[in-house]
Image: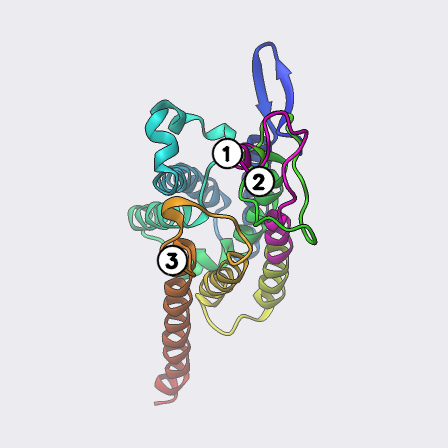
Amino acid sequence: MFRTLFHIGSLEIHTYGIMQAMAFFVAIFVGVRRAREEGIDPNVIFDLAIWVLISVVIGARIWYVVEHFAEYSENPFDVLKIWQGGLVFYGGFIGGFVGSLLFLKIRKLSFTKLGDVVAPTMPLGIAIGRIGCFLNGCCYGRISETWGIPFPAKDLPPAYADQLRHNLIKPGAVESLPVIPTQLYATLDNLVIFGILMLLSRKKPFQGFLIWLFFGLYGLHRFFIDFFRYYEGAANAFKFLTLSQITSIFVVIISTFALLILYRQNKRKPEKAKS
């Protein structure tokens, strides 16, 4: 709704970029506090954050460009305009996962131990970031007269521009057709996931529980919310499922197996101790 926050001369400061930055710093703040509680050097969180930030942005942008290749093939330099929006979580997830694994290997740190520390920070960061998506007018849902919200023509948000490009609205229309605000639904869902992880962090059954539970819960959230999202082009992998939904299925399956394996390993430890 407020795509451009303010101007510094000819430079536009976008709300999307501000909200993503806020999400990043809030996640670091919570991560540092949790690291101290777990007896981990807070500097590890700062170092990890730099690795993850770079790898997440690269991965998220690549995935988005692949999904909207036709749009960027005409204007290839627009690929670099990240501040205007256009990041896909699962691209960022893959990029961030690879980046964090490299960091952990170099620093010789435990994935499950550090993963449990940062697990709650991820849905919190995503929740804040999705508010930025809403203000930017991207990542919106399907057209709905009942549940939808129109986006004004000012600053030409993606929700308006896409409908104009597909002749769903006429040039000069003051606002878009109402679309489901899936960004806000995502914010609410991720805040719930954040609350669940924080509550369970007090009495987690085994190491690695929180990080894999987050992956599983987010996969379920993304699978269902994508039924209400608007997609086009390569984002629609099959007739009824999106590329993100297919990825979500694999994420949930992998997370479930990881939790079962860790549970069994943890259950065997007391038995070995007794023997």
Can you tell which mark lies on residue 85? Answer: 1
Which amino acid is tagged 1? Gly
Which amino acid is tagged 2? Cys
Is residue 184 found inside the magenta-colored segment of the image?
A: yes
**Image-quadrant location for residue 25:** top right
Q: Is residue 96 visible?
A: no
Q: Which residue is mark 3?
A: 111
Give the CA distance from mark 2 to mark 3: 30 Å
Q: Label 1: few (<14), some or many (≥20) within 10 Å?
A: many
Considering the numbered disc 2 on the image, is that residue within a helix, a strand or a loop? Answer: helix
Which stretch is magenta? 161-189
**Image-quadrant location for residue 249:** bottom left
Tell me what residue is drawn at x 40 percent, y 48 percent: 235
Residue 94 on image: x %, y %: 36, 50
Q: Which residue is mark 2?
A: 133
Name the quadrant of the C terminus: bottom left
In terms of depth relative to the viewer, which is nearer, 90 or 241?
241
Marks 1 & 2, CB-CB < 8 Å contact: yes
In terms of depth relative to the viewer, which is nearer, 217 or 141?
141
